[in-house]
């Protein structure tokens, strides 16, 4: 079979800058059942194998360091339909003239996979039952062990191969990659955690891939928790199934929030873009609110005030004298267009009183850092936050996993085991917009909408980046974006700033929180306010 036998496949999609649907296991089973009932036997498995063959042949063609005739692909097939996908892929590559070897430790069982096995054997694909001692002779390795639905940890030969594939992806990411079919084996596609890790003392094993080709639609677990590290570069192969009708969870992208950004016409003025007050800064902790306030300036707020709780603060910010610093009692918070509350706020009785004072104000509010811990330990504050949301004025809460655990009365590992469920529970409990920070930040609305953010990297793992995010979202609230869209835009730009700076060589190691805000300004203007000659 020649390359031309594979379709050009508009079916291979990059998730980059697309608000694509993220499908849970339940969604996928429904779609698969509906499609299989309407199609000839083996169609979906054939399409999955064809998409994978097209993807790999393109990768092989691009790799000019190795002659095509010298490429050698090794595949492992598990006992289910994921193994069947690998068998179809192996046959198609073999028919296209690529050297392939397939390992099948346990024979496949489902009818579709049995058909794939028979056709692979008939085509002359070399099938072994044990993996080789070394993968050094292979230019590409393919994980077709298990797809979605794995309920138990990888064991035996599958766990051993998972470790070997992961080592290859880690030590030789550009020389002989690891392709996972659908999801890396051992990864829970719904949660992004390793299947059964931590259960009965099991550490769990999962494949670390350099690339994942995921079928029908992308899975949320590929973009959050451990999934971002394990999946590598993700490509979607819809294989002819429309998944948009089941878009209960989406990937964050500009199309979800761009229309809500304010126009910047010639006739606008600073009042057009709102006044934000960043509330916090107990004695000795004014750095956090100033970081947040600087970020708000760079995100386009018309005026930015810093309302400080403590003593001994500087009278102004020398790098940014545009910021207006006040003792909190000297600033009329009810006259602001938005409040960002919590940065460096502390836990003294004064902070609790400020929380009680600001909650009744008819002003959009974001709560972060110390404000979240105060809400977690004071039932009356928690009830007031919920009441605001029930009345149609949802607050934005931006917890990291430990803060989320305090708000939910659980622990951080429990939050991380299912980040989507934790964000959904917080949104329901507080009738608010939740930004559950971490890799693959989750944005949840009280009406049930869930969005997973794809931007950001390890450059954000440094002090002060959360304060910067609070300032960015606060500035967008001041510019009259609805709370959910302000959170989407803020999280996306915050992460993209880290990605862009890292691509320039300024991260991920050593990037400081203060460097993010100028890049947020650059991206905001480049993407949404391009200059007109």
Image (cartoon, grey):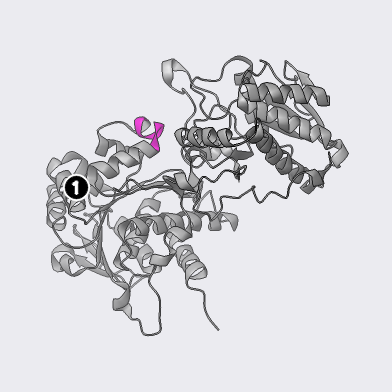
Q: In the rendered picture of this protein, how many numbered marks are placed on residues?
A: 1
**Residue depicted at x 67% and y 38%:** 47
**Residue depicted at x 36% and y 68%:** 297
- Residue bearing the label numbered 1: 386
- Horizontally, is 261 left or right of 380 in the view? right
* Above or below 49: residue 359: below
Magenta highlight range = 414-419
- Horizontally, is 233 left or right of 413 in the view? right
Q: Looking at the picture, tell me which residue is in the foreground, 391 or 7.
A: 7
Asked whether the viewer can see residue 29, the reply is: yes
Disc 1 secondary structure class: helix
Image quadrant containing the C terminus: bottom right
Percent of width and height locating residue 501: 54, 58
* Above or below 108: residue 242: below
State whether the magenta stretch is mostly helix, strand or loop.
helix
**Residue depicted at x 40% and y 84%:** 266
């Amino acid at each position: 079979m020649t390359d031309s036998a594979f379709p050009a496949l508009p079916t291979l999609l990059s998730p980059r800058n697309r608000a694509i649907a993220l499908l849970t296991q339940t969604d996928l089973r429904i779609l698969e059942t509906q499609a299989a009932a309407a199609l000839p036997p083996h169609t979906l498995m054939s399409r999955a194998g064809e998409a994978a063959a097209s993807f790999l042949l393109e990768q092989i063609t691009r790799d000019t360091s190795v002659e095509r005739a010298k490429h050698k692909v090794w595949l492992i097939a598990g006992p289910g339909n994921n193994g069947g996908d690998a068998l179809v892929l192996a046959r198609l590559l073999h028919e296209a003239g690529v050297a392939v070897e397939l390992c099948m430790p346990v024979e496949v069982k489902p009818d579709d996979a049995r058909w794939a096995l028979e056709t692979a054997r008939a085509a002359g694909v070399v099938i072994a039952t044990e993996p080789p001692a070394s993968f050094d002779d292979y230019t590409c390795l393919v994980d077709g062990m298990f797809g979605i639905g794995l309920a138990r940890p990888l064991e035996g030969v599958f766990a051993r191969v998972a470790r070997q594939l992961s080592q290859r992806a880690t030590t030789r990411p550009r020389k002989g990659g690891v392709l996972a079919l659908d999801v890396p084996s051992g990864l829970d596609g719904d949660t992004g955690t390793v299947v059964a890790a931590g259960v009965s003392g099991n550490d769990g094993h999962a494949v670390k891939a350099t690339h994942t080709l995921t079928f029908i639609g992308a899975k949320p677990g590929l973009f959050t928790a451990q999934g971002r590290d394990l999946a590598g570069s993700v490509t979607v192969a819809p294989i002819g199934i429309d998944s948009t009708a089941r878009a209960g969870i989406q990937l964050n992208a500009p199309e979800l929030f761009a229309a809500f950004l304010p126009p910047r016409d010639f006739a606008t003025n600073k009042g057009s873009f709102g006044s934000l007050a960043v509330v916090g800064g107990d004695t000795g902790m004014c750095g956090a609110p100033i970081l947040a306030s600087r970020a708000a300036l760079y995100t386009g707020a018309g005026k930015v005030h810093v309302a400080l709780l403590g003593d001994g603060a500087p009278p102004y910010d020398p790098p940014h004298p545009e910021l207006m610093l006040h003792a909190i009692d000297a600033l009329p918070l009810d006259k602001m267009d938005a409040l960002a509350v919590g940065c460096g706020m502390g836990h003294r009785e004064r902070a609790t009183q400020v929380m009680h004072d600001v909650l009744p104000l008819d002003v959009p509010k974001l709560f972060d850092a110390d404000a979240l811990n105060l809400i977690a330990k004071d039932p009356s504050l928690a009830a007031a936050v919920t009441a605001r949301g029930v009345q149609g004025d949802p607050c934005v809460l931006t917890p990291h996993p430990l803060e989320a655990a305090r708000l939910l009365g659980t622990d951080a590992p429990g939050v991380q085991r299912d980040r989507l469920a934790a964000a959904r529970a917080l949104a329901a409990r507080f009738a608010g917009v939740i930004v559950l920070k971490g890799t693959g930040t989750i944005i949840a609305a009280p009406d049930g909408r869930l969005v997973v953010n794809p931007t950001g990297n390890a450059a954000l793992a440094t002090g002060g980046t959360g304060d910067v995010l609070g300032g960015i979202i606060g500035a967008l609230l001041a510019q009259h974006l609805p709370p959910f869209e302000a959170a989407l835009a803020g999280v996306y730009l915050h992460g993209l700033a880290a990605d862009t700076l890292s691509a320039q060589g300024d991260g991920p190691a050593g990037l400081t929180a203060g460097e993010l805000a100028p890049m947020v300004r650059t991206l905001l203007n480049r993407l949404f306010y391009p200059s007109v000659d």
